[in-house]
Image (cartoon, grey):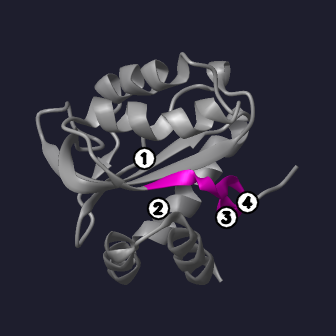
Amino acid sequence: MQYQLVDLIKENHIIVGVEAETAEEAIRIITQTLENDGYVNPQYAYDVWLREQTFPTGLPTQPTGIAIPHADADNVIKSAITIGILKRPVSFSQMGTDGSTTVSVQIIFVLAIKEREKQVDMISQLVRLIQSPELLSSLLQVKNAKEVVELINRSVK
C-alpha cells in the first residue's frame, strides 16, 4: 500500500502545549497517544528513546528546532505519526553528531512506521515539509490539533 505523510497524521495523535522537562519525557508523553489508540505496544516509547541515544534526530531548523524520533517496527502495530508541540523547548542531540551538539526543540514528530521499507520515504517527505520556516512558525502559534492538521495539509498540496 502506498501512502503519503498526511495519511498517517490524525488529529487525535497531535498534542498542542506539551509540558515536558526533557526530550525523553516529551517522547513518552507524545507516544502515549499512539499507545492509547493501539497503534504501538507499551515498549515503543522506550525503543524510541533508546534509538535516540545512538542516532539523534534533532534538526536545527528555523524558527525552532524539530526532532523526528522513531524506532524499529518491532513494537508498531499500525503505522502513524504523532506530533507534539511543546510549551517550552527541550534539548535533543543534533542529527548526524555524536550527541555532544544539541538543538533546542519545540516541535516533535514521532514516527511509528510498520513497514520498514517505507520509513525512509516518510522521513524524506517530513524533511521536505519542515524546511518551511513559515510552516514551523505557524505550528508554534496553533491552538489545537485541528489547526495542525489543516496547516500540514495546506503545506503538502
Report if the CB atoms under discs 1 and 2 are less than 8 Å apart: yes
Q: Which mark is residue 68?
A: 1
Is 95 placed left or right of 122 in the picture? left
Q: Which of label 1 and label 4 is nearer to you?
A: 4
Left or right of residue 16: residue 10: right
- SS assignment at label 4: helix
Q: Is residue 20 above or below residue 135?
A: above
Q: Position of residue 92 (x, y in %)?
A: 23, 41
- Secondary structure at numbered mark 3: helix
Write down the quadrant of residue 11 in the picture: bottom right
Q: Residues within 10 Å of mark 3 (few under 14, many from 20)?
A: some
Q: Disc 4 residue type?
A: Asp
Distance from label 1 to label 3 (Cα)?
15 Å
Query: Going from the N terminus, do you reach mark 1 or mark 4 first?
Result: 4
Mark 1: secondary structure: loop
Q: Label 2: which residue?
A: 127
The amino acid pointed to by label 3 is Val
CA–CA distance in space, label 3 to label 4:
4 Å
Q: Position of residue 143 (x, y in %)?
A: 41, 72
As shown in the figure, which amino acid type bears the numbered disc 2?
Answer: Val
Q: Position of residue 88 (x, y in %)?
A: 19, 54
For marks 1 and 2, the one nearer the N-term is 1
Sooner in the amino-acid sequence: mark 2 or mark 3: 3
Distance Cα–Cα, label 1 vs label 2:
9 Å
Question: Label 3, on which residue?
Answer: 6
Residue marked by disc 4? 7
Q: Are marks 4 and 2 in contact (CB under 8 Å)?
A: no
Q: From the viewer's perspective, is the residue at label 1 or at label 2 nearer?
A: 1
Task: Report the span colored magenta.
Answer: 4-15
